[in-house]
Image (spheres, helix red, strand yellow):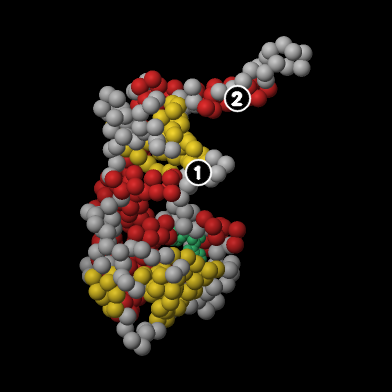
Amino acid sequence: MPSWEKQSVSPDRSGISSISKAEEELQKFKLAVENASDHIIITNENAVILYANKAVERITGFSQKEVVGKKAGTKELWGGMMPREFYETMWETIKNRKKVFTGEVQNRRKNGEIYTALASISPVLGDNGAVRFFVGIERDITKEKAIDLAKTEFVSLASHQLRTPLTAINWYSEMLLSGDVGPLSEEQSRYLKEVYKGSQRMVRLVNDLLNVSRLEAGGLIVEPVPAKIDSLIAASIKEGKFSVGAEKEIPVRFERSKEETKLAVDSELLNQVFRNLINNAVRYCSGRPNPKVEVSLDKRPVDGVNSLVIEVRDNGIGIPKLEQGRVFEKFFRASNAQKAAAGGTGLGLYISKTVVEKWGGKIWFESEEGKDTAFYVTIPLTGMVFQKGEKKLA
Ligand code: ADP
């Protein structure tokens, strides 16, 4: 019997032997663990299983009897399916650093079926600070993963299918508006501009959705090659039609560095992130008095990493203090933004943050409602981190 199960039955005050209060509490506790829907095991400091609850059998197919005395995380039972580094990190975390490890893990049931589990392993320390036990809790998330994947695939397919007709609408509207196929009356031109604006908004939404599904499916490529950053930024500003409502141009000021910065970057990704920040800055200061957007570059350490910091500053609506914590969440749009600029998707910054972190950089902002907003993006001076993969952004 494991040591934590050894409990004495003590006589009560009347002298009659009865289950003590502590024993009763312990029984309740044991029942709860035994019947929990998550798989729970307790191992000794060498991962040899001392206890397994009922869910272990339901999930893995191995009976409680079969697992007790065997080593957890090995091929003999449901484990051993992950790359070596996964187990190394796990052991380093729970044994040496004595911290909780959490992660998604692929396991194999007794019948050979592979399943995905969300695992959390906690060390239980003795009075002397040494590890006495490990408690491993796993939740089978195979079904949730499959639903998630199906959703991602659906969004990806739907967005892909929508792009072709949208491109046609955009194309023909542009052609008609340019007057290439004959003049339009003022009224026709006004309506057509609305069609054009609407279809551009849809293209943005469809591209954003497609990008989110690509990023969430994993495998984004980051292919850094040496590039002149000042020139890239200047070209990106020049290319973008930063006019809101197709009429009012907002000036975007960029002062190039005296000495052009050269860094290994994936210019497509940098462009994507930078354009998103500029677009936001322009959209959220349009209609305000003296709107202006300023871009600047600086080299300085950020969290101990020597970095190139790109700053995009505007004097627009700002971000309300209470909502600042949610700005990088998927689909989040601050209340003042919803009122000021129709047509945002709330996906741009979520995409940007995922991409920037993928290349080894950071993204953050400083803002005050009704005043300035400054977004900052960094690239390590050693260049963007190369990432193998097969997916590019739309
Ligand atoms: P959206 O398409 O809504 O702009 P983003 O993901 O790019 O989506 O931005 C999320 C939210 O962050 C915006 O809806 C807005 O509330 C806020 N935001 C982003 N950039 C700015 C900015 N320059 N000024 C004010 N608010 C901003």
CB of mark 1 near ligand 1 (< 8 Å): no
Question: In this rendering, which labeled residue sits more in front, label 2 or label 1?
Answer: 1
On the image, the x and y values in percent for residue 353 come to 41, 60
Give the number of callouts. Answer: 2
Tell me the kind of residue under disc 2.
Answer: Leu
Residue displayed at 48% across by 47% down:
99
On the image, the x and y values in percent for residue 352 come to 39, 61
Q: Which numbered disc flags the more N-terminal residue, 2 or 1? A: 2
Q: CA distance from mark 2 to mark 1?
A: 24 Å
Quarter residue 250 falls in: bottom left
Residue farthest bottom in this picture: 258
Give the numbered dot on residue 130.
1
**Residue 284 visible here:** no
Residue displayed at 26% across by 27% down:
112
Classed neighbour count for the residue bearing mark 2: other residues with Cα under 10 Å, few (<14), some (14–19), many (≥20)? some
Residue that numbered label 2 is attached to: 26
On the image, the x and y values in percent for residue 176 come to 27, 65
Front residue of this view, candidates 198 and 79: 79
